[in-house]
Image: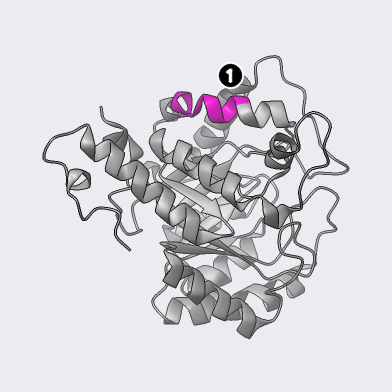
């Protein structure tokens, strides 16, 4: 099986001939990455459209920070932040994902035009989430999650991080399937940075191929995360700020695309859009006659 054929297609979403690029729009005042730059609805919509212009295939809209130690917003505030942005982007023809752990936000976002629900808890934070998504027939991202982050990490102890993440994701996927979500609408995410230290994240990235054993398309969300700061800082240096980790993010995007990821989730789209297209062209060059082998592949 080629990397491309192993990438998979998610029912209910467009089909791309390469690793898709999911652009991030944080409608929050306290994101670790962009510090509330898109908190205003009009600014968030404008930013989402700009990311599409830069090469994003879909836009992930979130109204609640999941950084370590973040205080949860209440339901009404999350709805106020998210729904107008989802509605406007969807009305402009953008494929929208909603990043939420609340069933009510997922339900209203789907009604407003969202096409995908990206729940970092995999349905564990809100027992109503799986029934809501199943009833809507929407695609669903199941991320590896061990609980709300309080402090720098939660339950980040592993004897074998790849095997344990794989086993825990498999159990969660089984629960989601039992809850009525169709198998061709499930995406899995190893949850980089969630209850994991830098060495765990790097080990998971080195073994993404093993996650294909779950039989579902793979989303990799490494953008600007702490482990990249640790890599860039070296053994003695201070990690660079989040917004100075975009080149490193693009490198991970290329590696993830090469490993057969269905999509990568990133804050800065342009470099990653180029990276996944180059990865696709290299794949195509290994297969004579494939579209990616043609000289026009990767043109912007």
In the image, taking residue 71 as reference, residue 78 lies left or right, namely left
Q: Position of residue 39 (x, y in %)?
A: 71, 75
The reply to whether residue 24 is visible in this rendering is yes
In-image side of 127 versus 19 (left or right): right
Boundaries of the magenta span: 203-211
Asked whether 251 or 218 is in front, the reply is 251
Task: Residue 258: name its quadrant.
Answer: top left
Residue at figure coordinates x 44%, y 58% from the top left = 138
- Residue highlighted by disc 1: 163
Which residue, as the protein is rendered here, is positioned at the far bottom? 42
User: Which quadrant would the C terminus be assigned to in this image?
Assistant: bottom left
Closer to the camera in the image, 45 or 225: 225
In the image: residue 193, left or right of residue 55? right
Nearer-the-camera pick, 16 or 126: 16
At horizontal 46% and vertical 23% (from top left) the residue drawn is 210
- Picture layout, residue 175 above or below residue 10: above
**Coordinates of residue 94 in the picture (x, y in percent):** 42, 72
Q: How is the image coloured?
A: one colour
Which residue occupies 50% across, 69% down? 51
Residue at position x 29%, y 59% in the image:
299
């Amino acid at each position: 099986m080629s990397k491309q054929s192993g990438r998979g297609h998610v029912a209910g979403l467009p089909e791309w001939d390469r690793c898709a690029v999911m652009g991030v729009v944080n409608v929050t005042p306290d994101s670790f990455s962009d510090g509330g730059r898109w908190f205003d609805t009009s600014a968030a919509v404008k930013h989402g459209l700009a990311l599409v212009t830069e090469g994003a295939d879909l836009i992930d809209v979130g109204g609640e920070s999941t950084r370590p130690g973040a205080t949860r917003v209440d339901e009404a505030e999350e709805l106020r932040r998210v729904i107008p942005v989802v509605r406007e982007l969807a009305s402009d023809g953008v494929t929208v994902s909603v990043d939420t752990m609340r069933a009510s936000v997922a339900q209203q976002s789907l009604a407003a035009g969202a096409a995908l629900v990206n729940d970092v808890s995999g349905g564990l934070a809100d027992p109503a989430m799986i029934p809501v998504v199943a009833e809507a027939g929407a695609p669903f991202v199941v991320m590896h999650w061990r609980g709300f982050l309080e402090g720098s990490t939660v339950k980040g102890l592993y004897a074998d991080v790849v095997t344990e993440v794989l086993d825990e994701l498999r159990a969660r996927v089984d629960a989601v399937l039992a809850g009525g979500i169709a198998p061709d609408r499930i995406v899995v995410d190893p949850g980089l940075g969630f209850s994991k230290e830098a060495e765990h994240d790097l080990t998971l990235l080195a073994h993404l191929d093993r996650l294909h054993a779950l039989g579902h398309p793979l989303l990799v969300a490494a953008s600007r995360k702490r482990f990249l700061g640790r890599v860039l800082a070296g053994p003695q240096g201070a990690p660079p700020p989040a917004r100075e980790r975009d080149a490193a993010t693009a490198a991970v995007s290329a590696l993830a695309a090469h490993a057969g990821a269905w999509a990568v989730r990133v804050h800065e789209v342009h470099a990653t859009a180029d990276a996944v297209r180059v990865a696709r062209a290299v794949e195509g060059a290994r297969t004579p006659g494939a579209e990616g082998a043609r000289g026009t592949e990767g043109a912007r």
